[in-house]
Image: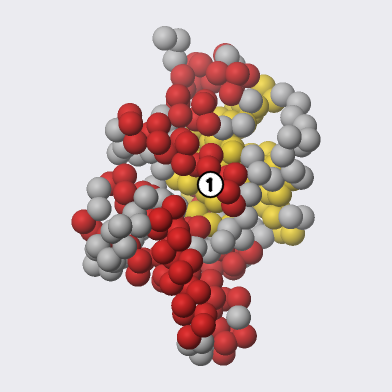
Amino acid sequence: MSQEKFTTSAFGLPILEVKNLTRCFGGLVAVNDVSFTIIQYEIFGLIGPNGAGKTTLFNLMTGFITPSSGQLLYQGTEISQLHPHEIASLGIGRTFQNIRLFAELSALENVRIARDCRIKTNTFKGILGLPPAPKEEQKSKQKALELLELIGLGERVNEKAKNFSYGDQRRLEIARALALEPQILLLDEPAAGMNPSEKKQLSKFIRNLRDRYNLTIILIEHHVPLVMGLCDRIAVLDFGQLIALGEPSVVRNDPAVIEAYLGND
C-alpha cells in the first residue's frame, strides 16, 4: 500500500485516529484492519468501488455501529463504543448517503430541529428536559437563518423540504449537520445526483465551509475529478482494506488504485 509522508504544518494536529478498525457481519469482513489519522482542518477523501466498506467506516466513525475490533480516538479519547448522539455532541457531524430530512417541514424547521437538539444537549435546561429560554429560541432561529443563507436557500426558508431539488436537499442536509457546530463534518456522497455545474459549485462550497468554520471535512464521493481537485489527502478502500493513502497526485498514480478503481483509461 502506498502511503506518503504527510506533515501537519499546513493544517493542525491529529484530530481523529482510526486504529486497526475491523467490522464483521457474520462471515463478511466489511472493514478489515483499517488505520489512518485525520489532521485538523484538512479535507480528506474516502474513495473506492461500491461495496468497498466506505459507508460502513463512516457508520463506525459516528457510532451507528460498533467495531468488531480496533479503536477510534477523537482528540485522544476513545469513542468507538459511544452512541451516535454522544459522538455528535462531542463535535462530529455527518450527512447520509440517503437524504434524511423531514419532508413535510420547512427548510427553517429542519435546521432548527438540529440546532435545538444541540441546545438541549449542551445546556442545564436541556438536561432537565425544559424548553429553551426565549433568548435561546431567538438565537437558534437566527443561526438557522444564517446557515440557510450560507447554503443559498435564504429566500426559501419557509418552503417544505420535499419541494427542493435533489441538490438543494443535499445542501439542506449539510446545513442541518452544521447546526450542531461540529469540528469534524462527514459527508457521504454529497455530489450524488448533481449535474456538472452543481458539482463544481459544491467543490467551492465545501472548501469555503472548511475555511469559514475551521472545519475538518471527511467525504465519501464517487466523482473522482471532484475528489482529486478538492481533497488534501485521499484514502482508498477495496474489499474493506486500505490500499492507498496520500495526496491526490500519489493516489492517482498508484497501481493498486488504478487496478481496483480508477481503471487504465
Against 178, residue 211 (above or below) is above
Q: Amino acid at mark 1?
A: Leu
Q: Where, by quadrant of the figure, is residue 244 drawn?
A: top right
**Residue, far front:** 155
Q: Where, by quadrant of the figure, is residue 201 drawn?
A: top left
Residue 103 visible somewhere in the drawing = no
Quadrant into which the N terminus falls: top right
Residue 25 at x, y percent in the picture: 49, 49
Q: Residue at horizontal 60%, vertical 81%?
A: 123
Q: Residue beneath label 1, please?
A: 209
Q: Residue at horizontal 35%, vertical 57%?
A: 154
Query: Which of 59/139 is in front?
Result: 139
Locate residue 65 relative to residue 193 in the image: left or right. right
Residue 127 at x, y percent in the picture: 58, 85
Query: Which of 239/152 is in front?
Result: 152
Residue 213 visible somewhere in the drawing = yes
Q: Residue at horizontal 69%, vertical 45%?
A: 40
Locate residue 16 relative to residue 258 in the image: left or right. right
Q: Of helix, strand and loop, which one carries label 1? A: helix
Against 260, residue 84 (above or below) is below
**How many discs appear?**
1
Q: Residues within 10 Å of mark 1 (few under 14, many from 20)?
A: some
Query: Which of 19/192 is in front?
Result: 192
Against 64, residue 152 (above or below) is above
Q: Residue at horizontal 56%, vertical 32%?
A: 231
Residue 181 at x, y percent in the picture: 56, 61
Residue 195 at x, y percent in the picture: 29, 33
Against 208, residue 86 (above or below) is below
